[in-house]
Image: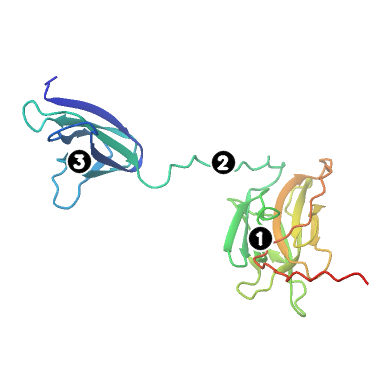
Amino acid sequence: MDASERRAILKVERGLSSLTYRADAGSLGDGPVAEVVAVSPGLRLVSAPGEPDALLRTPGRVLVIAADQPGTIEVVLRAARAGATLAATLELTRMGAEAEPSPEPRLRPSLAEGGVEFLLRAHVSLRGDLAAPRGHWICGPDAPGRIEGLEMRAVGEDLPIEYQVAVAGRGAGWSNWTPAGAYAGTRGKALPLIGLRARLTAAAAPGLALRADGAFLGASLVTRRGRDVELLGPTPLDPLVGLRLDFVSALEPVAGSPSMPPVRQPSRLRVFRRPQPEREAA
């Protein structure tokens, strides 16, 4: 290798990275010129406006590397003149937040024989439309939200379920029975659901049942199981703030579920009380 140059191969992660040329703290005189002479496929270099591509002439200059996939770059440091120093530091930094690990996949529980994969969709106050696969919570104990309407939709097959909802408000009562794939409830009217009924249709397999878990604000979780189920809070004023629904075998023994504390929505209201002076004893 030529004594007037140094070469290095640097690994680049997927995303945006910056290559910064920093002078060596103990160097004297002109520093070397840094040049990226090779990049692997999927990598692109972006220079500052007016600067030569892939060239860092002086300390403080920066190149941005856009990487569609992980790769490498080859960098050469060349002395500014014969006998000049090659001491310099190249700093490769990934831009933005550190890469987050891929989330663990949400595994659905085993599908009961005769069951159908489906999605549960809900319109939630202040959050919009949310969806979850069977066997998973929409909102629920860890993230309660006032559910205003529901839809159950099959994935690739007919879903043998129909449902009713009860909406809060004077004279609202229960809706008509709604077939799978249709929406029941309201949107944007600030009228949460206070009850849900779901039942299997005649097309469902004989050995199939439903398991429904409901979270009502200020109350413990409600669990119901059977070919038709009903979820209601302790009073007509308790909104439904979480729902989980799945198929189970009608012959499967019912496991006892641990008691859960009442579901409470976090409050943003802070109350400050003025301390009362102590009364003197008579």
Q: Nearer the viewer, mark 2 or mark 1?
A: 2
Disc with the residue nearer the chain's start (3 vs 1): 3
Q: Is residue 233 above or below residue 8?
A: below
Instruction: Say which mark, if any, is on residue 282.
Output: none
Q: Residue furthest top?
A: 1
Q: What's the distance in space between the residues labelled 3 and 2, CA to CA? A: 45 Å
Q: What's the distance in space between the residues labelled 3 and 1, CA to CA? A: 65 Å
Q: Position of residue 106 (x, y in %)?
A: 60, 43
Please report contact status of discs 3 and 2: CB closer than 8 Å, yes or no.
no
Instruction: Say which mark, if any, is on residue 105.
Output: 2
The residue to which callout 1 is attached is 180
Q: Amino acid at mark 3?
A: Pro
Question: Is 29 positioned to the left or the right of 97 in the image?
Answer: left
Question: Is 208 positioned to the left or the right of 158 in the image?
Answer: right
Please report contact status of discs 2 and 1: CB closer than 8 Å, yes or no.
no
Disc with the residue nearer the chain's start (3 vs 2): 3
Looking at the rendered image, the quarter that the C terminus falls into is bottom right
Q: Nearer the viewer, residue 89 or 164?
A: 89
Residue 34 appears in the figure: yes
Q: Residue furthest right?
A: 282
Q: Quadrant of residue 197?
A: bottom right
Q: Nearer the viewer, mark 3 or mark 1?
A: 3
The residue to which callout 3 is attached is 59
Q: What's the distance in space between the residues labelled 2 and 1, CA to CA? A: 26 Å
Q: Quadrant of residue 77?
A: top left
In the image, what residue occupies the spot 20% across and 26% down? 7
Image mark count: 3
Q: Quadrant of residue 131?
A: bottom right
Q: Amino acid at mark 1?
A: Ala
Q: Position of residue 80 (x, y in %)?
A: 9, 33
Secondary structure beneath dot 1 equals: loop
